Image (cartoon, rainbow, N blue to C red):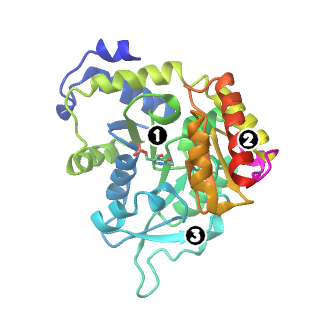
Amino acid sequence: MRRAMAEAEVGDDVFGEDPTVCLLEEETATLLGKEAALLVPSGCMGNEIAVSVHTRAGDSILLDRYCHIVQVEARAVTEMLGRRFLLRDGDRGRLRPEEVDAAAPHGEPGQAPLGLVEVENTHNWASGAIYPLERLEAVSRAARARSLPVHMDGARLWNASAATGIPLASYAACADSVMVCYSKGLGAPVGSAIAGTKAFIQEARGARKMLGGAMRQAGILAAGAIHALRHHVARLASDHARAKRLAESFAETEGLTIDPDEIETNIVIASVTTRPEKLQEFVRAVASAGVLVAPFGGPGRFRAVTHLDVDDAGVERAIGAVRDAARSVLAR
Ligand SMILES: Cc1ncc(COP(=O)(O)O)c(C=O)c1O
């Protein structure tokens, strides 16, 4: 990947003249079955651009309350862009079509007009849960029946597709815009994209500039992302198998609770049930064995993620580190 980045042919992407960026955008749009795509520096910016193009200041966005847009991007969406949230308790992060049906399209008196439905696939806070395609299609139909656009935060859409065998484009067809990340599990150092119609992407280009995300010789980054798409997608199934192995072992570890059946992709969230107040100490003890897990997803919960730098031996080491930390910290 580093070599591909060093050797990348570049131009000025502010003028749309970087051939490597253009190639990445074309490949991404094709994979997602959309007319066009746009490279952006981060997943957050991709989501913010979509919000900015689909909605106007004062509009609300219907979404699950644990979506990344709410948990991490709320300042950008509410303070900077002036949009509001219409929050729902999703089923492991997934909306139900009835919730879209029930949302008043023009807003109740005193409420903000509804401008967008947002879905996250896979869902970070729900341990990488996948939206079943039929559910996504039903949510999308309900939104379209009300002329509401749908934005998909598909930071890890590759993982959903790898786990189910359902083509990326089938998921993407349920949304008007899709954000995907080349960083995270695909292993590129920087980069995400949004995809949609040509008209959407033309407006998105302006929003990207507004947010400070237009880059110049960005082909260096795009080359890393192209390498990731060509070499690191096929291996995602191994991350999923390793995540399952981690979850099964955590389930057998005294002091921890997790349902391994819920682990479908590469994110494993478990709870420290015996001594939740000791979570930080537990995480530090795991780290002292050279294994990183993060407090995540609520009181007493922590997250482990498998990715291309974790092999089978690494997973076994992580299992040992978590067991030892549970024994030494949670049993006391
Ligand atoms: C579901 C989801 N969406 C968006 C993002 C934001 O991506 P970035 O960190 O590249 O801004 C993340 C990051 O973890 C994420 O998990």
Locate residue 316 relative to residue 294 in the image: left or right. right
> Would you place residue 261 above or below residue 138 in this image?
above
Sequence order check, earlier mark of 2 and 3:
3
Q: Amino acid at mark 3?
A: Arg
Q: Which residue is mark 1?
A: 180
Label 1 Cα neighbours within 10 Å, binned few <14 / some 14-19 / many ≥20: many
Q: Amino acid at mark 2?
A: Arg
Label 3 Cα neighbours within 10 Å, binned few <14 / some 14-19 / many ≥20: some
Report helix, strand or loop for mark 3.
Answer: strand
Whether pointer 2 and pointer 3 mark residues with C-beta atoms closer than 8 Å, the reply is no
> Would you place residue 278 above or below residue 16 in this image?
below
Judge by depth and name the residue closer to the eye, 138 or 265: 265
Q: CA distance from mark 1 to mark 2?
A: 34 Å
Report helix, strand or loop for mark 1.
Answer: strand
Residue 2 drawn at (x, y percent):
37, 16
As for residue 260 lying within the magenta part, the answer is: yes
Q: Residue furthest right?
A: 252
Res. 186 in view: yes
At 48% from the left edge and 24% from the top edge, which residue is drawn?
Answer: 229
Q: Which mark is residue 323?
A: 2
Label 2 Cα neighbours within 10 Å, binned few <14 / some 14-19 / many ≥20: many
At 32% from the left edge and 57% from the top edge, which residue is drawn?
Answer: 52
Q: Which mark is residue 136?
A: none
Span highlighted in magenta in the image: 252-264
Mark 2 or 3: the one toward you = 2
Res. 237 in view: no
Judge by depth and name the residue closer to the eye, 119 or 306: 306
Q: Which residue is mark 3?
A: 88
Whether pointer 1 and pointer 2 mark residues with C-beta atoms closer than 8 Å, the reply is no
Judge by depth and name the residue closer to the eye, 45 or 171: 45
